[in-house]
Image (cartoon, helix red, strand yellow):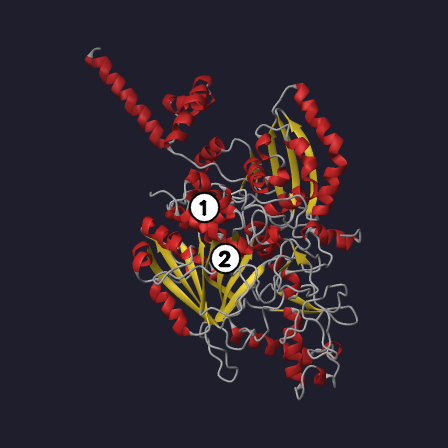
Amino acid sequence: MSAMQGAFDPSELQGNILRGYRRAAVRYAVFEVVKPVAARRWLGRSASGGDAEVPAVTPERSWSVRPDYCFNVGLTFAGLRALGLGAAMLAQFPGEFAAGMVRRAVKLGDVGTSAPECWPAPFDQPARVHLVAAIYADDGAHLDAVQRLLEQGDAAQGLRLMGIRNGGNFDGDFVHFGYRDNISQPRFAEIAEHADLGEPIAPLGMALLGHSTGLEGVSWRVPQPSVLGHNGCFNAFRILAQDVAGFEGYLDQTAEQLLADPRGAVLLPPGDEGRIGAGLTRRAALREVVAAALCGRWRNGVPLALSPETPNPEPAVSLTAFDYTDDRRCPVGAHIRRSNPRGAKIVQRVASHTRRLIRRGMPYGPRFDPDRPDHVERGLLGNFIGASLGAQFEAVMYDWVNLGLQDPRITGSNDPILGVNDPATSWFDLPLRDGKPIRLAGLPRFVTTRGGAYLFLPSLPALKFLASLSPV
Amino acid sequence: MSIRSASAALRLVRLRGAEAMSGSVGWLERVVDRLPDSPVFQFLARHVLVPFWAWRTPVAVAEGGPVMTIAPGDNVQRMMNLVMKLKDPSPIGRAKAALAIAQNVDEIYAGLNNVGTVHFARFVLVGDHLCMFSVYDGDFTNYIRDFIATIGSVFDAVVALIDGGDAVIPTEQNVEAFIDWVHARDLYQVPDLATDLLNQQRDGSATETDIRRLPRALILQLQANPNVSLGSGYRAYPGFSAAQLRHRLEVGW
């Protein structure tokens, strides 16, 4: 075990943490542990390279040839207990993980229509959500093949399938509100492919237990024995429904408002519509200006911080190497700035760069067709990963995405895209060149939580340790 | 007892009953009324009745600090009433605590300033306890975590003087445990609205809404949480964060 804590060996990690697989489809299978002995046997086989009946947990590694599928597992606190982990070891896990996502609902803004009481199966029975397996592949046939393995042998004996969620890319990195996503992620010096993208290199302890965190001198508790906690991390798995019709409708409504408002001409001088997009009407151009302000990026991913005037700057700008030195470029309340203020001045000075999250997400549901608007459920299957749920995910959700404590100019407002907004009280300030912002009001809630769980993503040695627990 | 005297006694009882029924006060009622003020009853209530009642009707120790809420106005200017029992409650121990604060006060205040979300904070010695009372914005765990990340090594000197403090120092290496430790010593805040207390005690299962139960509920809660904050306190300018006030007063945030 002491050797394990020596040199960092990435191949001991599950492969979906430090970088994304970039596959076309994902399937999450939610299980209840019903027979711990069989479940542990299955887990041990999976963590030890798999076999004809059991899919192998995919470790962190560089590929020369992409495998047919990737497979990873996360466990809830209830799942660790169901597998037979003793009370003394369970007690070393952080309180928020032990409480679980449902009991943290108010803190996360999961209230009203997002409240756990409204979540469909299997998330309506959080005590039975024990293990979430993620299958990644480029087509449905491979997803089905792996799922069939999960319905036979030790898996069938030890685990009960509670439900599945399917996700898939429909347009590369573009997601349902029409933005390019998956651009900015924490980069780690230990991963060779993380070339210098102009963002600060994150300390490994931002993602994994047992390493230096971004907070000087501060370390998170590693559940003991070391093999259990070391190199593990936590994942807030979220099913986030997106109201695309509502979002596009809000852009329509705001564009109309700006057409009637003389300050709309300061925001976008008449005649400048072409720099937003070739052939756009003034109304269509204003829609895109507002969409960019709400997010902090144009829909093609170009950051307002580097290109506030146009989504198509000449020469092209970096999508990642930027900061918020000029406040008039990117609204303080814009989604990407709220959730990651980078080097901007913030109220909680010590929290700069320390609340970063690894985001691994894939859309679900059919692509929205603006010509045939519908209200079919669609959204994002999101994973928000870090070494501390409390210091990262929850801190971002509670103080920054909602409430807006990080900057006094947005305190009391919520994230325009992700926040718990009520049209009666919501607001968002669009900065203008002359300094006085246009205050948009009436933002509804565009994103609704439809399920989720706090998961522990153990290292491979930890999975083998769990598999080796004495029978209960 | 003769038949005559027995029937007289019966008449008396009937008469008393009629008096009681009609609202006038008889001797028995007067005894009952005076009972709570009698030393014997007070002794029994304190040492027998209430402990027995609390044992029969267990009430969970209520969590410290303000309740979680999503309303922005309730998420700023939140109160922390941290009450920490001194290891050594003698005048010498209390003097040590006073010195530990005095020696580190500049760094502690600088740390609070750096946290950015703190309005006020002060240290008070009350009996055997060192108290830290503060008003902060946002999430309690973020406040404590940022505080420790800033000046944990300095604050350890204070924590070392507290009963149970050794288990959580150095605080920088025991952040999660220290947050729980502080949370356990932060006073429960009795809801501002009396009915909220009943709602909290209902635990979602029962349907009890009888306002007349309130004093009993409060007694049981105070048996479980001897020290409490009565409500969440008065605010002269509610709804503003520390940084918003600094921003508006142009004193830098």
Dot 2 falls on a residue whose secondary structure is: loop
Give the distance between the C-alpha atoms of the residues marked 2 and 1, in whole angstroms.
44 Å
Q: Amino acid at mark 2?
A: Gln
Counting from the top left corner in percent of width and height, residue B225 is at 50, 33
Q: Which residue is mark 2?
A: A14
Please report, as a chain letter, where disc 2 is located. A
**Image quadrant occupied by the N terminus of chain B:** top left
Foreground tag (2 vs 1): 2
Please report, as a chain letter, where disc 1 is located. B
The vertical placement of B17 against A47, above or below, is above
Counting from the top left corner in percent of width and height, residue A435 is at 78, 68
Looking at the picture, tell me which residue is in the foreground, A362 or A151.
Answer: A151
Which image quadrant for residue A283?
A: bottom right
Residue drawn at (71%, 43%) of the image:
B112
Counting from the top left corner in percent of width and height, residue B141 is at 59, 46
Which image quadrant for residue A146?
A: bottom left
Residue drawn at (36%, 42%) of the image:
A470
Q: Which residue is mark 1?
A: B199
- Number of residues whose C-alpha sits closer than 10 Å to that of mark 2, classed few (under 14), some (14–19) or many (20 or more): many
Direction left: furthest residue: B3
Looking at the picture, tell me which residue is in the foreground, B180 or B83.
Answer: B180
Direction top: furthest residue: B1
- Using residue A224 as the reference point, say whether residue A156 is left or right of it: left
- Using residue B33 as the reference point, say whether residue B158 is left or right of it: right
Residue drawn at (61%, 61%) of the image:
A414
Which image quadrant for residue B98?
A: top right
- Using residue B153 as the reference point, say whether residue A372 is left or right of it: left
Q: Amino acid at mark 1?
A: Asn
Direction bottom: furthest residue: A279
- Number of residues whose C-alpha sits closer than 10 Å to that of mark 1, classed few (under 14), some (14–19) or many (20 or more): some
